[in-house]
Amino acid sequence: MTDFYVGDKEYFPKIGKVRYEGPESDNPLAFKFYDPEKKVGKKKMKDHLRFAVAYWHSFCADGTDPFGSATHAHPWIADAKTPMEAARHKMDAAFEFITKLGAEFYCFHDRDMAPEGVSPSESEKNLFTLVERAKKLQKATGVKLLWGTANLFTHPRFMNGAATNPEFTVLALAAAQVKAAIDATIILGGQGYTFWGGREGYMSLLNTDLKREKEHLARFLSLARDYARSQGFKGAFYIEPKPMEPTKHQYDYDTETVIGFLKANGLDKDFRLNIEANHAELAGHDFAHELETAAAAGMLGSVDANRGEPRNGWDTDQFPTSYYETAMAMYAVLKAGGFSTGGLNFDAKIRRNSVDPTDLFAAHIGGMDTFAVGLEIAQRIIADGKIPGFVKKRYSSFNSGDGAKFEKGLLSLTDLAAIGQADYGKSGITSGRQEYLENILNQYLLGL
Ligand code: XUL
Ligand code: CO
């Protein structure tokens, strides 16, 4: 038994607090690179990275896949007599796990935390009963809520969408769920509220009025925003883009699409992007591309940290293991000024055949170490200045003279044409030096 459990029973009795032991450690349950108090640039590692554990994958997912039944026999469910008792045990296990791991935050869907009841009012009662328990456990452990959300995709009633459902009353029921999930997020001091539109899209254009569905989605989001603000919610709203799965086409396809949608509907002041690595890959983008695109619009909010399997075409939600990917990601995050309300939420699950009780810890430890290395490399890129310096110089012809006039909107197309013609043959054959820059990054990756 250890000191790090807060519920009635300890669910990971053989595992104590995970500590930093350094790169040479061969303890599988220690951090090799994530040293929470270590200063990287001006901030501590933990304040840069703001790790969150995803309630749904870590404590609800049971290893089920389309071809096989559950493989993870969670002890917190095994001895429960009712769904509410199971939910209480699950919560105790979750807070024990998060505390032992040393992550500062968690994220949840309403239905991860509390079972759906036989009526909307029973569902709400279940939710708020468990929210009270979560509030106490947050206080006891210091763990905080990064963001909350509503699950508007699992129940059969949402088979045709939630905010984009062709039946008005289904949309209205989704609103009831979002309203309660916003209230729960406020009670728990959530720093954000996320919308991931799992079934907000279509399976066939033959049965879909795309224009009307997108208008409904925009109105729904505006109403949710207005309600949350009226209740005093000061945090950020996030849209989490994903191009497909479970739908053939999801309306919040990728970051650029979402930015356009938010701007077209006057939502860009309150909403930012929650970028998920695996979703970026499904959209045919690099993770860093999505981060840079959001940052360029001043709308980078938070991150769902995971990875896909490049040889599969679906959302495998694996834990991050690539230093290259996390270095590029953290470079984008640092350039954007770091996280404010957001953080790195491990929207990732252990594999179906990862059935050892230590696997959930190993997965998070690896993910946190991988991002810690990525952070250090990103900081190195910035501190060393070679790569950002190269980029700065590459655009320096816009810093003064006619280039600066162009940026300020002081030149007409005719002015530009005259300047271009006078310069004919003198510029353009300038190396982008990609290979040189890639070599520098590889040097940093090896810590040289
Ligand atoms: C699904 C996904 C969700 C959202 C929250 O692909 O990423 O878990 O993060 O609803
Ligand atoms: Co996600």
Image (cartoon, rainbow, N blue to C red):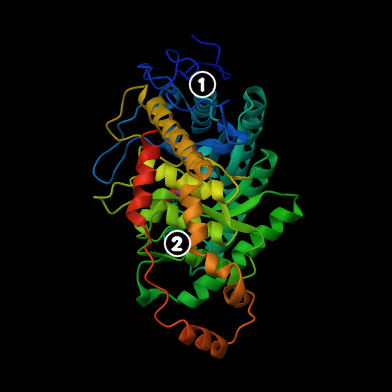
- Find disc 1 in the rendering and name its residue: 100
Q: Residue at x 44, y 15 (%)?
A: 15
**Residue 380 point in image, percent of width and height:** 49, 39
Q: Mark 2 sits on what residue?
A: 254
Quarter-wise, where is residue 99 in the image? top right
Residue 288 location (% of width, % of height): 44, 52
The answer to whether residue 132 is above or below residue 325 is above
Mark 2 neighbour class, 10 Å CA radius: few under 14, some 14 to 19, many 20 or more: many
Can you say whether 37 is above or below 218 in the image?
above
Where residue 10 appears, as percent x and y from the top left, is 50, 16
Gap in angstroms between the C-alphas marked 2 and 1: 35 Å
Q: Earlier in the sequence, mark 2 or mark 1?
A: 1
Disc 2 under 8 Å from ligand 1? The reply is no
Q: Is residue 58 visible?
A: yes
In the image, 382: left or right of 312? Answer: right
Q: Left of 59 or right of it: where is 84?
A: right
Amino acid type of disc 2? Asp
Q: Amino acid at mark 1?
A: Lys
In this rendered view, identify the residue nearer to me: 300 or 12.
300
SS for callout 1: helix
Please report the residue visible at 59 percent of the width from the left and 87 percent of the height from the top: 412
313 vs 27: above or below: below
Q: Say which of 31 and 148 sits in front.
A: 31
Which residue occupies the foreground of this view, 67 or 29? 29
At x 60% / y 62%, what residue is drawn? 221
Classify 311 as above or below 188.
below
Q: Residues within 10 Å of mark 1 (few under 14, many from 20)?
A: many
- Asked which quadrant contains residue 433, the reply is bottom left
Could you say which disc has been placed on residue 198 in the image? none
Q: Secondary structure at mark 2?
A: loop
The quadrant of the image that shows the C terminus is top left
Q: Position of residue 253 (x, y in %)?
A: 43, 63
